[in-house]
Image (spheres, grey):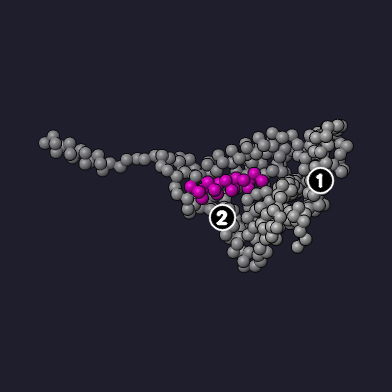
C-alpha cells in the first residue's frame, strides 16, 4: 500500500509544471528579430528627449543626431544578433533605455576627455581671438615646433573642410561653436546650426580618414572608389555610399536597395533616403583627397 502511495505521489509530482526563469535560458539564435521593427523604432525615438537633455548639460546638443544613430544601430544589432533577452517584468523599452544610458555616458566621457575642437574653428577669421584660442586649446603665443606643426595641420584641415561644405553651412557651424550658449527649448534656427555642426564634423572626420589612406601603387579606379566609400564616418553612411552612391543607382533599383539597407541596418527607408545626399557629399570629399594621394585624373 505504501509502495502504491509513493508511486502515485511521484506520478503527480512529475505532472506538476515546473516554472523556469526565462532569464536563465540562453540567448535566442540569430535570425528573425523577436521584436517587431515598428516597436524598435518607437522605443528608440522614445529616448531622444533623454539624449537631448544629457548632451545639453555639457553644451553638446549638436551631437544628438550622431548619438541617436549610434543607439539605433546598437539596438538593432542587439536584437538581430540575439544579444537581447527578454527578462520577466522588464519591458523591451527599459532595455533600450539602458543601451541609451551607456552610449550617452560613453559619448560624454569622450567629449570631456579632450578640450579642443581643432577642426571646427576658422583660424583665418578668428585667429587673434583669445576666446576662440581657448576653445581650441592653442595658446595665443606659442613658440614650440610641435604647436606650430599642429596649427599648420589645423589650417590645412580647415581649408579642406571649408571647401567641401557650403558657405552657409560653414558660417552656421562656426556661429554655433563660438557664439554664446543658449538655454531653453531649441528653436528651428538652433536645429539648423546643430545640423551644420554635424555636417562640418562628419566632413572633417571623413577627410581625416581619407588623409590616412595610402593607396597601393597600381590600385585601379574601382578599388579607389571602394576606398573612398570606406572613409565615411558612420556605418549607415558607408553602406549608403557603397551600395547606392558608388553604383549610381536610380529609380526602382535604388528603391529596392533602400529597402534592403533599411532591413540590414534597422532603420526606416525614409532615414536611408534622407542620408543619400549627405553620403554622396562625403563620398566626393573622400574621393578628392584619395585621388590627390593616388595622383590619378579626376572622373
Query: Which of the marked residues, 2 or 1, is nearer the chain's N terminus?
Result: 1
Q: Nearer the viewer, residue 112 or 118?
A: 118
What residue is disc 1 on? Answer: 156
Residue 55 seen from this side: yes
Q: Nearer the viewer, residue 137 or 2?
A: 137
What's drawn in magenta, residue-wise? 66-82
**Image spot of residue 234 (x, y percent):** 65, 49
Mark 2–mark 1 Cα distance, whole angstroms, equals: 37 Å
**Image spot of residue 178 (x, y percent):** 80, 40
**Image spot of residue 180 (x, y percent):** 80, 38
What residue is disc 2 on? Answer: 264
Q: Does the magenta stretch include residue 68?
A: yes
Say what secondary structure mark 1 lies in.
Answer: helix
Q: Residue 216 carries which label?
A: none
> Residue at image x 79%, y 37%?
136
Q: Which quarter of the picture shows residue 56?
A: top right
210 horizontally vs 267: left or right: right
Q: Which quarter of the picture shows residue 12?
A: top left
Which quadrant, please, contains the C terminus? bottom right
Amino acid at each position: 500500500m505504501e509502495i502504491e502511495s509513493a508511486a502515485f505521489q511521484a506520478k503527480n509530482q512529475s505532472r506538476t509544471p515546473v516554472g523556469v526563469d526565462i532569464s536563465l535560458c540562453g540567448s535566442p539564435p540569430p535570425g528573425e528579430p523577436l521584436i517587431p521593427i515598428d516597436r524598435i523604432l518607437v522605443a528608440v525615438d522614445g529616448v531622444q528627449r533623454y539624449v537631448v537633455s544629457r548632451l545639453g548639460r555639457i553644451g553638446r546638443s549638436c551631437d544628438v543626431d550622431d548619438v541617436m544613430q549610434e543607439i539605433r544601430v546598437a539596438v538593432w544589432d542587439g536584437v538581430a544578433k540575439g544579444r537581447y533577452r527578454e527578462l520577466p517584468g522588464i519591458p523591451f523599452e527599459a532595455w533600450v533605455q539602458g543601451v541609451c544610458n551607456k552610449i550617452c555616458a560613453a559619448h560624454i566621457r569622450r567629449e570631456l576627455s579632450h578640450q579642443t575642437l581643432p577642426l571646427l574653428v576658422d583660424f583665418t577669421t578668428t585667429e587673434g581671438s583669445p576666446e576662440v584660442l581657448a576653445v581650441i586649446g592653442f595658446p595665443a603665443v606659442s613658440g614650440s615646433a610641435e604647436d606650430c606643426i599642429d596649427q599648420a595641420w589645423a589650417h590645412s584641415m580647415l581649408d579642406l573642410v571649408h571647401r567641401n561644405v557650403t558657405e552657409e553651412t560653414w558660417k552656421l557651424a562656426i556661429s554655433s561653436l563660438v557664439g554664446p550658449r543658449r538655454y531653453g527649448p531649441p528653436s528651428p534656427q538652433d536645429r539648423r546650426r546643430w545640423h551644420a555642426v554635424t555636417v562640418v564634423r562628419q566632413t572633417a572626420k571623413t577627410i581625416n580618414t581619407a588623409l590616412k589612406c595610402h593607396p597601393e601603387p597600381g590600385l585601379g579606379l574601382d578599388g579607389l572608389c571602394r576606398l573612398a566609400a570606406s572613409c565615411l564616418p558612420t556605418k549607415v553612411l558607408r553602406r549608403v555610399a557603397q551600395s547606392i552612391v558608388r553604383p549610381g543607382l536610380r529609380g526602382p533599383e535604388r528603391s529596392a536597395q533602400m529597402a534592403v539597407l533599411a532591413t540590414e541596418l534597422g532603420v526606416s527607408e525614409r532615414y536611408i533616403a534622407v542620408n543619400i545626399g549627405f553620403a554622396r557629399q562625403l563620398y566626393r570629399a573622400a574621393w578628392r583627397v584619395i585621388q590627390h594621394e593616388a595622383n590619378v585624373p579626376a572622373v
